[in-house]
């Protein structure tokens, strides 16, 4: 095993395949200049997602960007009151490989503080923007442990235009497993389709919107047969049927990619409904970790250190 891969490895096979429903709660307007001139769709689309989850009896995990929590604190309270987990998604939505360790630590602390002020909750989970945990950001796990987190869902196993950690599962000899315990943090990579070294996060977002429903069902059946937990993601804007006149900041000069960001939104929840039918066992991420890693249950009971002095 390569010596530069994280030292501590404990693997847990999922006895019954579990669907982990993740919502990346962020506001795209925060990521480009002049975004505040557009009306936010986050409250309306989030409530649509909450109704969908209630209809299908699913408890989900909402990975919350701090700026969005600051803007809509009562919405975060409603999410929690309806039985869903609140987790961190950084404060400013910057990929891990674009920040230093100290910058990340400050950003994460601000994210924790913002959620605490809105809900009085102590968070246990983290998801990096763009699944940007890569080999050169292995410091992520020691920082998360320092803050008392129990798990992360920040890796895409394969090459991807934005990030990717090719061979992550193979490095831990856990090809058919859904999670890895490393440096005291459970990493639950986003479910991806591997084609050679390329990994496509097909369990949500643009891929789930663009791929035909029958093809997605075949993929999900494959994950069921492998007894691997399926880790999903969806954004509020993924189901927004309006077409605001702005370009996504990641694709400023590419008209085609911006167009694709709007394709398939109308049918996405129907596809997820079909996915839910295939997985009788659904779980919040924190409950999954508690079930399969009982040694982690006492983690996360830390007192949150609030940075600012004006917190009531």
Image: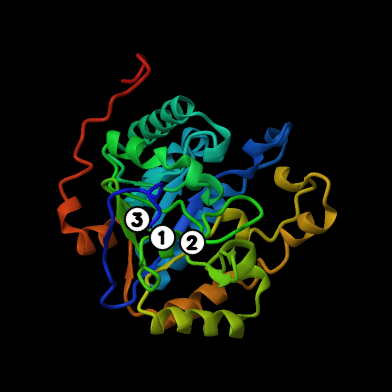
The residue located at (84%, 54%) in the rendering is: 255
Q: Position of residue 249 (x, y in %)?
A: 72, 42
Position of 301 with respect to 255 (left or right) is: left
Can residue 21 be spotted in the picture? no
Looking at the rendering, which quadrant does residue 246 occupy? top right
Q: Nearer the viewer, residue 262 or 125?
A: 125
Residue located 32% across and 23% down the image: 306
Q: Secondary structure at mark 3?
A: loop
The residue at which mark 1 appears reads as 171
Report crowding for label 1: few under 14, some 14 to 19, many 20 or more residues within 10 A (C-alpha).
some
Camera-nearest label, 2 or 3: 2
Name which residue lies at 77% across and 54% down: 258
Q: How far apart are labels 3 and 1 at the CA level?
A: 32 Å
Sequence-wise first label, 2 or 3:
3
Residue lying at the far top of the rendered structure: 309
Nearer the observer: mark 3 or 1; the answer is 1
Question: How far is mark 1 from mark 2, CA to CA?
Answer: 6 Å
Q: Report the side of 36 relative to 128 (left or right).
A: right
Residue on which disc 3 sits: 84
Q: Position of residue 184 (x, y in %)?
A: 26, 47
Question: Which residue matches tag 2?
Answer: 167
Q: Are marks 1 and 2 in contact (CB under 8 Å)?
A: yes
State whether residue 79 is above or below residue 215.
above
Going from the N terminus, do you reach mark 3 or mark 1 first?
Answer: 3
Residue at 37% over, 58% down: 1
């Amino acid at each position: 095993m390569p010596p530069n891969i994280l030292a501590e490895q404990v693997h847990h096979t999922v006895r019954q395949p579990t669907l982990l429903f993740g919502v990346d709660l962020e506001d795209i307007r925060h990521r480009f200049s002049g975004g505040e001139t557009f009306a936010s769709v986050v409250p309306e689309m989030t409530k649509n997602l909450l109704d969908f989850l209630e209809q299908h009896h699913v408890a989900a995990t909402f990975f919350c960007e701090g700026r969005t929590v600051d803007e809509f604190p009562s919405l975060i309270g409603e999410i929690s009151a309806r039985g869903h987990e609140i987790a961190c998604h950084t404060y400013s939505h910057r990929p891990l490989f674009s920040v230093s360790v100290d910058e990340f630590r400050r950003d994460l602390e601000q994210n924790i503080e913002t959620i605490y002020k809105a809900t009085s909750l102590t968070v246990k989970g983290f998801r990096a923007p763009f699944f940007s945990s890569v080999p050169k950001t292995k410091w992520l796990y020691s920082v998360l442990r320092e803050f008392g987190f129990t798990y992360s869902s920040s890796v895409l196993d394969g090459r991807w235009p934005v990030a990717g950690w090719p061979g992550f599962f193979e490095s831990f000899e856990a090809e058919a497993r859904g999670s890895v315990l490393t440096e005291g943090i459970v990493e639950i990579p986003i479910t991806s389709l591997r084609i050679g070294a390329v990994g496509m996060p097909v369990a949500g977002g643009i891929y789930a919107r663009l791929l035909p429903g029958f093809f997605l069902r075949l993929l999900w059946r494959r994950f069921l047969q492998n007894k691997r937990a399926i880790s999903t993601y969806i954004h509020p804007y993924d189901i927004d049927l309006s077409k605001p006149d702005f370009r996504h900041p990641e694709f400023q000069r590419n008209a085609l990619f911006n167009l694709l960001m709007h394709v398939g939104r109308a049918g996405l929840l129907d596809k997820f409904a079909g996915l839910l039918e295939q997985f009788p066992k659904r779980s919040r991420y924190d409950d999954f970790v508690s079930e399969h890693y009982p040694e982690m249950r006492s983690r996360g009971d830390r007192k949150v250190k609030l940075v600012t002095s004006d917190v009531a």
